Amino acid sequence: MPEMTNPRTFRIASRRSKMALAQTNRVIDALKEVAPQHTYDIIEIVSDGCYDRFKGDLKELGGKGAFTKALDAAILNNDADMAMHSMKDVPTDEILPEGLTIAAAMTRGDIRDVAVCREGESFVGLKEGAKVGTSSIRRAAQIKAHFPHLKVVPLRGNADTRIQKVDDRQIDAAILAKSGLERINLAHRISEVFEPDMIMPSAAQGIVGVMCRTDDADLKTLLAQISDENTMTCLQAERAMLTKLGGNCYTPVGGYCEVTKNNNLRLIALVASEDGQTMVRGRNKLEYTNAKTLGYTVADELLDQGAQKIIDACTKPSS
C-alpha cells in the first residue's frame, strides 16, 4: 500500500472524557505503529452531548448523534482531520453528515453489558425495589423483563461518574458496557457479566470507529492499514439492520454479528417494548460477502414479527 511521501500532522478531535481520550490514544498508538513518520495531535472538543454536561433525555439533543456531532463538525470545518467514535453512538449511514465516512474500525472489544455494584455486593443479591441505573432504553427494557423486582432509574455521566453514584448509594447498581470499562481500567469493578441471551448488546457495541472526510484520500489509505476486516464487516451488517428498522437511541433495539468457524456471518437481534413486556427476536446467517444483505434480512424478520409497531410506540413524541 503506497505511503505518503511527506510527513503530515494529523489533528484528531476528541471529547475530554477519560473514555474518549482512551479510545483516541488507542487509535494513535495503532497509527504510530504503521506510520511513525507522521505527527498526531489531539484537539479536545467540548460537545453538547457530553455526559458530564447534559443530564436530560437524549431526545432533546437529537438522539445518539448528539455525542458525535461536535466532533464531526470539527472535521467538516477543517479544524480536525479525524475523530474516534464508539460506533454504537453513531447515527446510521443514511443520516451520516455528508462529506464524512467511517474509514476504519478497530478490532472489536467485548460486546457484553455488565452490572457494577458496591464492592462486596452482587447483582443477583439485589433486593426488591433496588435501584438500577442506565442511560439506555434498550438496557432498561431488558432489565425490566428479566428482573421485574428491580427499579430502573435514569443514569447519566461518564462511566466513572456512574460508578461513583453506586458507591455514594444514590443507586444500587449501574449497567454499563464491558468494553468501555476495560478501556479505562475499571473492569475490576464488574459484579456481573450478562450474556447476550440475557441482555442483548447494542448494535456496534465494543467497536471504536474512525471518522474522516470522504475526500481525504491519503488519510483513508492510512486508516485502512489499522482497520480490522472482520470488525468492519460485522459493523456493516449491524448498521444495515438499524437502517432498515429505523432504530435510534430511544428504540430498544439490540443485535450483534459474528464470523462463524466456516467464515460465514451470523446476525442475532432483538426489538423490545420500553416496558420489556414485548420482545421479538431474529437471526440469520449468510456468506461473508453479504454483510448488508444479512442486516436487511434480519431486519425484515423482526418487522414480520411486529417490530414496526414496537418501534413506532417508542419513537412517538410525548404530548
Image (spheres, helix red, strand yellow):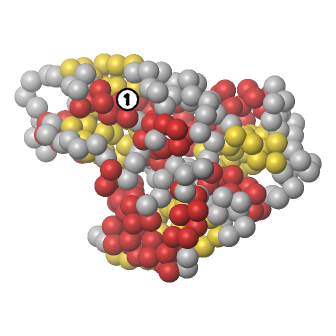
The image quadrant that residue 130 belongs to is top right
The image quadrant that residue 213 belongs to is top left
Q: Is residue 161 left or right of residue 126?
A: left
Residue appearing at x 23%, y 44% in the figure: 98
Count of number-bearing discs: 1
Residue appearing at x 53%, y 64% in the figure: 312
Residue appearing at x 15%, y 36% in the figure: 216
Quadrant, the N terminus:
top left
CA neighbours of label 1 inside 10 A, class few (<14), some (14 to 19), many (20+)? many
Kindly tell me whether residue 231 is visible in this rendering.
Answer: yes
Q: Is residue 140 above or below residue 86?
A: below
Q: Residue furthest left?
A: 5
User: Could you say where residue 168 lies in the image, as x and y percent from the top left?
Assistant: 81, 25
The image quadrant that residue 200 belongs to is bottom right
* Residue marked by disc 1: 70
Q: Is residue 72 left or right of residue 85?
A: left
Residue appearing at x 36%, y 30% in the figure: 71
Kindly tell me whether residue 36 is visible in this rendering.
Answer: no
Q: Is residue 178 above or below residue 240?
A: above
Q: Is residue 19 left or right of residue 102?
A: right
* Secondary structure of residue under mark 1: helix
User: Could you say where residue 3 lies in the image, as x and y percent from the top left?
Assistant: 12, 35
The three-letter code of the residue at mark 1 reads: Ala
Q: Is residue 140 above or below residue 272?
A: above
